[in-house]
Amino acid sequence: MLKILKYSFFDLIRSRWSIIYFFFYFVTGMVLLYLSNDVSKAVASLMNVTFILTPLIGTIFGVMNFYNSREFIELLLAQPVPRKNIFLGMFLGISTSLSLSLFLGMGLPFLIFGTFGSDQIMSLVFLLISGIFLTFIFTALAFYIALVNENRLKGFGLAILIWLFMAFIYDGVFLLLLIFLQEYPIEKFAIAMSLFNPVDLSRILIMLKLDISALMGYTGAVFNKFFGNNSGMLISIAALIIWSAVPVFLILKKSAKKDF
Amino acid sequence: MIEIKGIEKKFGSLEVLKGFDLSLSRGKITAVLGPNGSGKTTLIKSILGLVVPTVGEIRFQGQTIFNDWKYRKEVGYLPQIARFPENLKVKELFKLIEDIREAQGNPEGLIHSFGLEDFLNKKLRFLSGGTRQKVNLVLTFMFDCPLYILDEPTSGLDPIALIRLKDLIKEKKNKGITFLVTTHIMSLVEEISDELIFLLEGQVYFKGTYVEMLNAEKEENLERAIANILEKEHAKDS
Ligand SMILES: Nc1ncnc2c1ncn2[C@@H]1O[C@H](COP(=O)(O)OP(=O)(O)OP(=O)(O)O)[C@@H](O)[C@H]1O
Ligand SMILES: [Mg+2]
């Protein structure tokens, strides 16, 4: 499996898309730090970009890479390699490669500005962790969708739809529900809703870490009230781990039965 | 070497293989014949584990192949349609497969006999159809295996490459290697095959030698014998 992982990893990391992706975070991070010179503020601004962009990039690369590797997959399937190693290796290769671009692109500006000594640097670490979680989760979802749909256009459309839903629509629907159900005790419902969206979960995680109640939003506040900061963060992380595991499990299950 | 029992394969509502038994004997060249879409490739892919049969059992040297992968170390497979990562160079592809198989291959002699020296540094997507097929052949034969499964090995080859391929197959056969070959080239069947399987409508319609097939259909060449069978089936259907 390591060989396939390595091949997929280097194939992507050498491409110009990885470099563009890296520079995007690098430049954004530099500019934000230069303008504010405040770690918390920079992290809060970066967060909004990260939570839209990492799922989108994971989605696009997950789908495209799978469809573009059809040939490679067919070649590998006839070799003495277990099926699950092929799909796991490819998925891990893409997601670690994207995560590395994110990690370096976002981490380097903070290193350059010498902000690593400050106490607030942990909020950057948390942002990196949730960005990496989102990369893995959305790459896996996209990979699974591509595996199920032979039709590229349909697969691509579906994957983008999921991203749109998680990154934008979910929040709108959520907000509407909260307004309609104002009179009822809906805090538990709100918590449950958040658990079903990895983007929300990541946002809650960072808000709790930054501990800026003005930015926490309704769900962040509910999490804070119900679990307190620390257990709230633990629960978010646990939910993100489950979110990462489920699509991988689906990929393995589907790929074991598929005809090529 | 290979035992197939009651193999059935459906793609949705399309029944391609309708439950038959088949065994391949060691050291023989078996040719699988049948019209387009009769399920030859599906049968081969089932043996390789690329296609999962709906029902049935496949054994390789006595062991079931389902959920196994190690047996593929002993199978050299030539796909009907060669699919490669298109941005690789030919020699990078050879290296990659050696890496993945964790085995040292011997491509040099094959590269020479198929005249691929000048293409080693070219990217796969720039190769002509026949040249791709030669690369496909080198990739298959560069590893020593007791069994080779060749799906339409001659497609796109020029006469010289064809002669080289036949010689290669005969040479391996003399060393006791087993072959399973599909082809629409009847002269190839006549020249190299020991046994012949004719697939029709998801069943094994005929199994035997070349001469037995001619005698059964009372024809003097294979093309006519096959045309005969297809016409009879056609008459039955209508
Ligand atoms: N993955 C698949 N999904 C759906 N249908 C398939 C799939 N693979 C093959 N088929 C169908 O199964 C039937 C048998 O195909 P197969 O490729 O086995 O034929 P073949 O005997 O190899 O034909 P040819 O001589 O043209 O190579 C065809 O009707 C084909 O369309
Ligand atoms: Mg075929």
Image (cartoon, coloured by chain):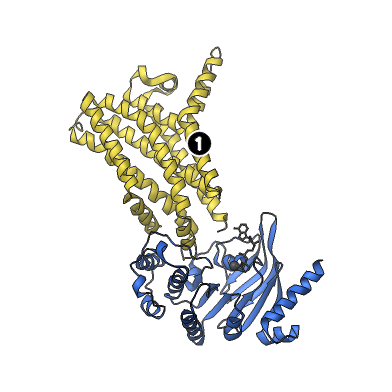
Given residues B140 and A115, the one toward you in this image is B140
Image-based side of B185 in relation to B78, left or right: right
Q: Could you tell me residue A246's position as x and y percent?
A: 50, 42
Q: Quadrant where the C terminus of chain A lies?
A: bottom right
Q: Could you tell me residue A249's position as x and y percent?
A: 50, 47
User: Which of the chains bears the disc numbered 1?
Assistant: A
Q: Colour of chain A?
A: yellow
Q: Could you tell me residue B139's position as x and y percent?
A: 43, 71
Residue identifier under label 1:
A162
Helix, strand or loop for disc 1? helix
Determine the residue positioned at 46% across, 53% down: A87
Determine the residue positioned at 25% across, 30% down: A121
Q: Which chain is blue?
A: B
Disc 1: CA contacts within 10 A as few (<14), some (14-19) or many (>=20): some
Q: Could you tell me residue A60's position as x and y percent?
A: 43, 42
Given residues B112 and B79, the one toward you in this image is B112
Determine the residue positioned at 48% across, 38% down: A160
| Amino acid identity at mark 1 | Ile
